Amino acid sequence: MVEDRELLRVENLTRIFGSGKSQVRAVDNVSFSIKEGEIVSLLGESGSGKTTTARLILKLLPPTSGKIIFRGKDITYVSSRKELLNYWREVQAIFQDPFSSFNIFYSIRRVLNNALRLVSESISREEREEMIKEVLLSVGLNPAEILDKRPYELSGGQRQRIMLARVLLIRPKLLVADEPTSMIDASSRAGILNLLMELRNAYGMSIIFITHDIGLAYYTSDRLFIMNSGKIVEEGDAEEIINNPKDDYTKKLLEDVPVIHRKWEL
């Protein structure tokens, strides 16, 4: 499903917080690209810079320096509401805590209707209702049980599936998934990951996983970018990196999860 066309490229991306002696280089001269239909992981421990990188790509933070090129266009300093909305139609996210992504006073019906407005204002009410019911069914939720509830009335797994339904309605070219399974129970994780993989297979969607979980990265990704202290310290094919790590930091990450090695040595 991976194509040769480049979808996103970041060049020398840097984000500095603070000033003077208290200055922190959260993202330090990071460069990488992702192709259409490709799944990659930004992998590292807490504080490695991976989530800040994601927020820069999502235009939720401005970079200190560097470039973000999307579909051949430099969008680094795009700032008008119209340009941002156009960008967010094609680049969407699901976050570690889906609860923080919702207005707690809105019903799920209203949340998903708002997502459809990002796509088009001309869709009729009847068409919107049908589309919403269809995507809820596709992520394993019963519309009759879900649509009139508020986010706080749902489980973590259900809220994450609502985020996936929102993505299905918008159908972006790129999905940034920031620790999408870390706050849901183990029984829901495989289902969420499989749904994300199906998005890639069905729509050619590219996905960037932001994760500290090496198992998740290996299971889902074509390529890995290992981050430490704001820098990419190793990158390449997922299987090659896991089986033959070069950087000491990558080796340390693997030593912390010996079960992965045992699996592949069988």
Image (tube, helix red, strand yellow):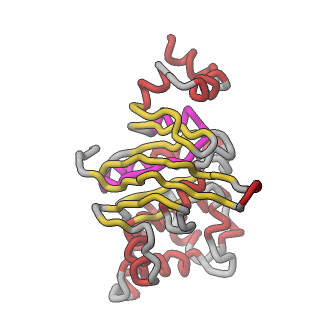
Name the residue furthest left: 4
Residue 113 shown in magenta: no
Is residue 57 visible in the rendered structure shown here?
yes
Whether residue 266 is situated above or below residue 87 in the rendered picture: above
- The image quadrant of residue 106 is bottom right
Closest to the observer: 48 or 214? Answer: 48
Q: Along the horizontal axis of the image, is 77 left or right of 150?
A: left
How many numbered dots are placed on residues in this image?
0
Q: Position of residue 70 (x, y in %)?
A: 35, 62
Is residue 180 visible in the rendered structure shown here?
no
User: Which residue is located at x 49 percent, y 54 percent?
Assistant: 13
User: Which residue is located at x 48 percent, y 68 percent?
Assistant: 166
Name the residue furthest right: 22
Q: Position of residue 14 (x, y in %)?
A: 54, 55
Which quadrant is the N terminus positioned in? top left
Q: Magenta stretch?
A: 196-220
Whether residue 247 is situated above or below residue 36 in the rendered picture: above
Mainly helix, strand or loop, the magenta region?
A: helix
Residue 216 shown in magenta: yes
Closest to the observer: 27 or 137? Answer: 27
Q: Position of residue 156 (x, y in %)?
A: 66, 57
User: Which residue is located at x 34 percent, y 85 percent?
Assistant: 123
Closest to the observer: 42 or 246? Answer: 246
Name the residue furthest top: 266
Closest to the observer: 26 or 175? Answer: 26
Q: Position of residue 203 (x, y in %)?
A: 31, 56
- The image quadrant of residue 61 is bottom right
